[in-house]
Image (cartoon, helix red, strand yellow):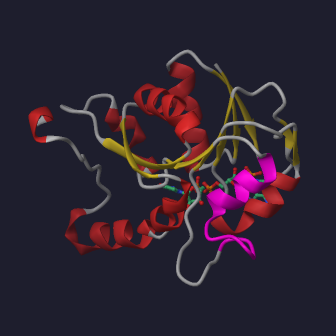
Amino acid sequence: MNITVIGRGNIGGGLADLWERAGHRVTRLGHDGGEAGAAEAVLLAVPGTAVEAALSSVKGLEGKAVLDATNLYGDARPPAGFASNAEYVKAVTGGPTAKAFSTNFAALFGQVAAARVRPSNLWAGDDQVEGLVTQLSLDAGYEAVRLGDLGMAATQEGLAGVLFSVAQSGLGQFVYRMAAPEQL
Ligand SMILES: NC(=O)c1ccc[n+]([C@@H]2O[C@H](COP(=O)([O-])OP(=O)(O)OC[C@H]3O[C@@H](n4cnc5c(N)ncnc54)[C@H](OP(=O)(O)O)[C@@H]3O)[C@@H](O)[C@H]2O)c1
């Protein structure tokens, strides 16, 4: 699959490495923007307050399936008029959209392949992008678990504070698993 990552830092660069290892072709864009017209999937992994600037510097996003990994911390808010960054993304692209990969620590990406069981990857978004999220989660070593439709993206964006608090309360950076009892 052709994937474009917008943001090539911890999350964008980390997932790009994992997806390339799984056989995908990944184009990595940063501050300079670029072209996403050939992408079959787009990952948005820029600071949560830079989403408008980042999307405005990338051409060819119309109708694209986008996985938005951004988080909003503290007083940071999504673009005016939107409940979440992910809903803003969908308004810009008009394509199927998911909030995904926002609740996993990038520093642990290198350890996930060796995990005894697959960690979960929470996502919230459109039905049309479920297969893509499931596949790209597996290709990164995770099992996708749906939180809800795109209306739940704001809830997921707010989970970053919960994750940090758990990490700072003694556990350190962690993975998590949500599974049906028969999968334990
Ligand atoms: N780190 C984590 O473990 C983690 C986990 C879950 C979610 N997240 C979320 O993922 C997002 C990225 O986090 P990160 O840790 O990967 O950040 P990072 O390492 O600082 O990387 C940020 C990337 O965003 C790009 N960028 C910044 N402003 C931009 C703009 N205006 N236009 C285009 N690109 C821009 C930077 O481009 P240049 O390369 O040109 O500098 C850089 O590649 C954040 O929203 C964060 O909350 C992070």
Nearer to us in this view, 67 or 90: 90
- Please give left or right for residue 156 compared with residue 67 in the image: left
In the rendered image of this protein, does residue 132 appear above or below residue 121? above
Question: 54 left or right of 69?
Answer: right
> Could you say where residue 16 lies in the image, as x and y percent from the top left?
59, 33
Residue appearing at x 81%, y 40% in the figure: 61
The picture places residue 91, in percent across and down from the top left corner, at: 76, 55
Q: Which residues are magenta?
A: 78-93
Residue situated furthest bottom in the rendering: 75
**Residue 170 appears in which quarter of the rendering?**
bottom left
State the image coordinates of residue 86 (x, y, percent, origin top left): 63, 57
> How many badges with numbers are in the image?
0
Q: Residue at x 71, y 54 (%)?
A: 89
Residue 94 drawn in magenta: no
Vertical side of 165 occupied by 121: above or below? above
Quadrant (top left, top right, bottom left, bottom right) of the N terminus: top right
Q: Residue at x 32, y 43 (%)?
A: 120
Q: Position of residue 18 (x, y in %)?
A: 50, 29
Looking at the rendered image, the quarter that the C terminus falls into is top left
Residue 19 can be seen in this image: yes
- Can see residue 47? no
Q: Is residue 117 above or below residue 177?
A: above
Whether residue 92 is in magenta: the answer is yes
- Where residue 87 sits, quadrant-wise, is bottom right
User: Image quadrant of ligand 1?
Assistant: bottom right
